[in-house]
Structures are given as C-alpha cells and as structure tokens.
Image: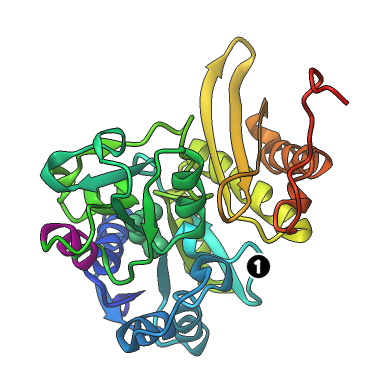
Amino acid sequence: MSAPVRVGTRRSLLATTQAGTVAELVRDLLGREVVLVEVTTEGDRSQAAGTPLVQSSSTGVFVGALRDALLRGDVDVAVHSLKDLPTYPAAGIALVAVPEREDPRDVVVGRDGLTLGELPVGSRVGTGSPRRAAQLHALGLGLDVVGVRGNVDSRIAKVRAGDVDAVVLARAGLARIHRLEEVSEVLDPLQVLPAPGQGALAVECRAEDPLATDLAALDHAPTRAAVEAERAVLATLEGGCSAPIGALADVVEGEDGDELWVRAVALSLDGTLSVRKSASGSTSDAVGVGTRLAQEMLADGAGQLDQPGPAIDTDPDRDS
Ligand SMILES: NCc1[nH]cc(CCC(=O)O)c1CC(=O)O
C-alpha cells in the first residue's frame, strides 16, 4: 500500500470544492487514497485583515503558500484557480494538468434579478477587479463601480443586504459552489472579456515527482491550448503595460483540424481607452497566437493606456 496522495488547497469554500474535484479525478485515475490538506495563504490572511488587495492575480498572493507547501513536501499536489497563477514559471514546480474548464464568462448578481442594462444610472456595482471595473465603465451605463472584497459568498451577501446593487463574479466560481441560481445576467464576452485562464484549474506537482507524469492524463488538450494562448497574451502585455487585460480563447473544429480563436482587450483603468483585437491560428501554436496578438495590441497603443493625457484622435473625418 502506498501513502495517500495529499492534495493541498486554500481554505475557502471555492478552493476546497475545486481541490475536491481534482482529488476525485486523481482517485479515479490512480486508484489511490487521496486526502485534502488545507493551507492558509497570505491572500487569505490579508483578506481577513481587510487590507486592500491590488491585482491579486498578477502578484499571486493566493498561490505562494500552496507552492511552498508543495516544495516542502507537506502536500503532493497543489490546486489553484488558473487565473490566480502568475504568468512566470515557479522553480521546481510543474503545471502538470489543466482539466476541462467551466464556462469562463463573468456574470452579474443583481438585486431583484436586474441585469446591468436594467440598473438605474448611478447604481452601485461591486468588484475588486480592475479588469471588471474598467469594462463596466466602458459600457457607458453611468454605473458607480465600488470596491468589494471577500469570498464569493460574502460578495453575494452584499447585494442581498443592499450594500450594493450588483456584483460581478466568475460564473465558474458560482457553478462550483452550486450558486448559479443567484445569477441575473451572463455577460457577453463581446462586452466583458474574462480574465486569462478564468474558469480553469491548475494542477501542480513537484517537477521531479513521478506523480507529475502520472497526473498529465488529467490534462484537457483544448482547455490547455486556450489558456496557454490567453496567458501568452497576458505575459506579453505585462511586459509593455500595467493596464487591465481580458482574454478569451476558444477551440473550434476547422476544416484542417482544430483552430484556436482568441479575443483580447486592454483598457485604461477608467475604461475610456481600450485596444481590442482578435486572432486565430493552430492549437499547436497557442503561445505563438497569443503572443502575436498581444504584440499587435502593443503596436496599436496598448502600452500607452496607463499614461495620463488626452485620448489619441484617430477620427479621419475630423476637421483639422
Ligand atoms: N479572483 C478570485 C477568484 N479566483 C478564481 C475565481 C473563480 C473561479 C475561476 O475564475 O476559475 C475567483 C472569484 C471570482 O473571480 O469571482
């Protein structure tokens, strides 16, 4: 009998649910005993203390403690929300599998079941995400975007308590904790693009652990290609700008095999300026497709969005 496989997770309901899903997959694949091990992360601590959390996804505050536990040998597998992973690799750690992802779109939980378009001008919409805030502003509905923090549960509770008129959340998180009935609107990616990697899970192991090879079977190739393209967009844009970024890739069946379609946006924080582009290519060149898309966005000014100053006037009909 071999020792049980220890799957490390953050303590929130969403995190333990996600880790439970992966634990089940590992159990079915290997036929071994699997246990969940809760690890307290810096992100959880600062969230509890109420300190502002800026760009949590890019700094990876939710990720570090789990990876430390993995490297120390306290756990054998770490499960993260892929969108919370930094784009740069971690020494000694392998991203062994990205299982099939949930619907990646953002959703609205509004008071009285209201959609964004039905909310009166000046309504308070809560989000802690600069990406969501910028895209909400860009809709031009006159919404008042206010910062909210905390886990999915407490953010929904703020709507029910009347603190805010609506909140924007990842549909995937609500699906995983069985709260989809709270949703009043699923946001069309044409208007609001999700975070790169949203809805997908990341399964990590120590790079040299034989388990890393065993668990590769949990990888879902189309999801892997999509999130690699999205993360390549993010990694390339991060090099040239600090603007909020949304990206979404889909794998569709083409005439010559599977094709990858990628959409991305970079916005100024107030949503008044944005660069939006799309590209397609082969699933076998996911990183290339995402990287080239981001390079085109930088050529179109995605690197200047965080600079104060007047909007660039590109109107050919302007009297000059
Ligand atoms: N930012 C925190 C976070 N990280 C992952 C999810 C949801 C699950 C996912 O996007 O895969 C959430 C909550 C949210 O954005 O509503």
From the top left corner, tell me how far across and down residue 14 is, in percent.
Answer: 26, 64
In this view, 170 is above or below 77: above
From the top left corner, tell me how far across and down residue 29 is, in percent.
Answer: 33, 54
Q: How is the image coloured?
A: rainbow
In this view, 275 is above or below 190: below
Residue 207 in view, yes or no: no
Q: Residue at x 69, y 56 (%)?
A: 235
Q: Which residue is the extreme one toward the front?
A: 319
Number of numbered callouts drawn: 1
Query: Label 1: which residue?
Result: 89
Residue 82 forms part of the magenta stretch: no
The quadrant in which residue 275 appears is top right
Tell me the element at label 1: loop
In this view, 90 is above or below 192: below
Amino acid beneath label 1: Pro
Q: Residue at x 61, y 39 (%)?
A: 264
From the top left corner, tell me how far across and down residue 224 is, in percent.
Answer: 53, 44
The residue lying toward the viewer, choosing from 159 and 175, is 159
Q: Which residue is the extreme one toward the top?
A: 255
From the top left corner, tell me how far across and down residue 300 is, in percent.
Answer: 79, 38
> Which image quarter has ligand 1?
bottom left
Residue 235 in view, yes or no: yes
**Looking at the rendering, in which quadrant would you find the C terminus?**
top right
**Looking at the rendering, in which quadrant would you find the N terminus?**
bottom left
What segment carries the magenta color?
Answer: 154-160
Q: Residue at x 77, y 60 (%)?
A: 239
**For residue 160, side relative to residue 296 (left or right):** left
Q: Main secondary structure of the magenta part?
A: helix
Mark 1, Cα crowd under 10 Å, few <14 / some 14-19 / many 20+, is: few
The residue lying toward the viewer, choosing from 215 and 280, is 280
The quadrant in which residue 151 appears is bottom left
**For residue 135, side relative to residue 157 (left or right):** right
